[in-house]
Every structure is written in structure tokens, then in C-alpha cells.
Image (cartoon, rainbow, N blue to C red):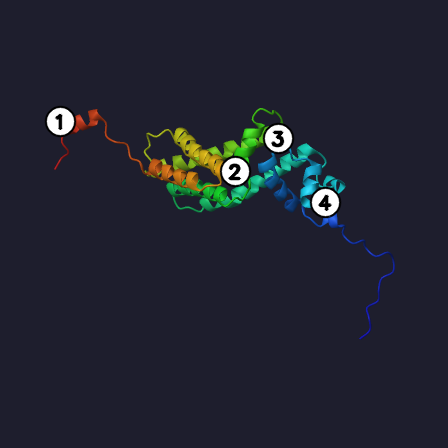
Amino acid sequence: MTEPTRESGPRPRKTRSDGERSRSAILREAAQLATVEGLEGLSISRLAEAVGMSKSGLFAHFGSKEELQLATIETASGIFNEQVVEPANLAGTGLERLRQLCENFLRHVQESVFPGGCFFASVAAEMDTHPGPVRDLAMQLTDDWRRQLEQAVRDAQAEGAVDPSEDAAQLAFELNAYLLLANAQFVAGQDSTPIERARRAIAHRLDHRPVASVEDTALEGVFPAPG
């Protein structure tokens, strides 16, 4: 068998080792670092050191620290949606979706998807007093999460699974408070007890049915149920 004819001209250059890491892989590492060292600590040079690249190699992907920070937040949001939100959206009812959103959040914290716990809890605490595009994006995505919880509450109310007299925004706030406290205590102590406490608190809150008031009980005595 004859060898194929080689085309004349210069051979294509091999891909540089710096370019072998995809932008996605770099940003996943950046998101990991950000929960431990903060977004402000996430510089081109620090990330280059962490992923074993040159600073010039990283500059090919990100032209500035702010661009890197914004891209890191978007990547973390994608991971969160993939692991927490999207599986819950497969639930058949609003109440089940609400339970799944809470459980998936706790599981992704407990499994240390990010070493510093929930990415957005970490970033919100760091950036809340730093105005600018990075803070705005972080706050927007944090609000999106709260609205996911609130919408699930409203859907459960429409289905009759949650008392319609409940303030949906208040209930979503309370559930999120359980989640965030569990996250903070788990990260600080590396102990699953806060995660289990949050699970019990959420189950109790969602299973709770309002107790009849004294007035209602008195009226039942005056006007007994038929039959």
C-alpha cells in the first residue's frame, strides 16, 4: 500500500497546552475558588495558578477581572440550575416541586458541589455592599431563586396543597431562611446536623395545617355540622 501524498507547506502548529483547557473547565474551577476565596480574590493570576496556566493563556479567555467574575457567576448559575432547579421542575405538582427545590438545595450543599457551600449565598454576603455589574448579576440570580420558591408555593396553593391564606412570599422567605442557615452552619462546622434540622423544619412547615381559632371552635358549638 502506497503512503498518502503529503501536502506541501508548513504543518499546522500543535495546540498550546494553555489552550487545551476549555473555557468551561476554567470557569468551573473559578466557581470553586470563589466560594472559598471570594470573587474579589478571584484574579487572573490567582486562577492561572490554580489551573496551571499562564496569565497570558487566561487573558485569551477573559480580558478583565470583571469579565472573569461575571462569567464565573453565570457558570455557577448553570451548575445550580442543572443540579437543583431542573430536576425539581420535573415534579408533577407544585408542592412536590417546592419540596424538591429545598431538598436539592440541601443535597448540593451537603455533597460539597462548591467547597464553600452555596455559591450565591457566599457571593451575596461578599458583594452586597459593592455596587456594580458583578453585584447586580449576583443579586438578580439570588432573586430568581427566591421567585422559584415563591412560584412553587403559589402553584401548591392553586392545587389546594398549601393553605391559600398563606402569604406566598413570606413562606418562600421562611423556607429560604432554613436553607441558608443550614448552608452557613454546615460550611462552618462540616457537620450534617444543620442539614437534617433544615429538612425537619421544612417538612414541619409544609405539613402544618392551621389550627382552628377559638372563635371558630365556639361557632362550631353553636352551629354544629349537619349530620
Closer to the eye: label 2 or 1:
2
Within-10-Å neighbours for mark 3: few <14, some 14–19, many 20+: many
Residue 85 visible to the viewer: no
Q: Position of residue 146 (x, y in %)?
A: 47, 33
Question: N-terminal of the two: label 2 or label 3?
Answer: 2
* Rendered image quadrant of residue 175: top left
Distance (Cα) linking label 3 and label 1: 62 Å
Q: Are marks 2 and 1 in contact (CB under 8 Å)?
A: no
Q: Which residue is mark 2?
A: 118
In the image, what residue type sits under mark 4? Met
Q: Which residue is mark 3?
A: 134
Q: Are marks 4 and 2 in contact (CB under 8 Å)?
A: no
Q: Position of residue 52 (x, y in %)?
A: 70, 46
* Rendered image quadrant of residue 34: top right
Distance (Cα) linking label 4 and label 1: 80 Å
In the image, what residue type sits under mark 1? Val
Which residue: 48% across, 37% down?
183
Q: Which residue is mark 1?
A: 222
Q: Which residue is mark 4?
A: 53
Closer to the eye: label 2 or 3:
2
- Which structural element holds mark 4? loop
Distance (Cα) linking label 2 and label 3: 17 Å
Within-10-Å neighbours for mark 2: few <14, some 14–19, many 20+: many
In the image, what residue type sits under mark 2? Cys
Within-10-Å neighbours for mark 1: few <14, some 14–19, many 20+: few
On-image quarter of the C terminus: top left
Left or right relative to 121: residue 160:
left
Where is 5 relative to 111, above or below? below
Question: N-terminal of the two: label 4 or label 2?
Answer: 4
Count of numbered circles in the view: 4
- The residue nearer to you, when weighing 119 against 152, is 119
Question: N-terminal of the two: label 2 or label 1?
Answer: 2
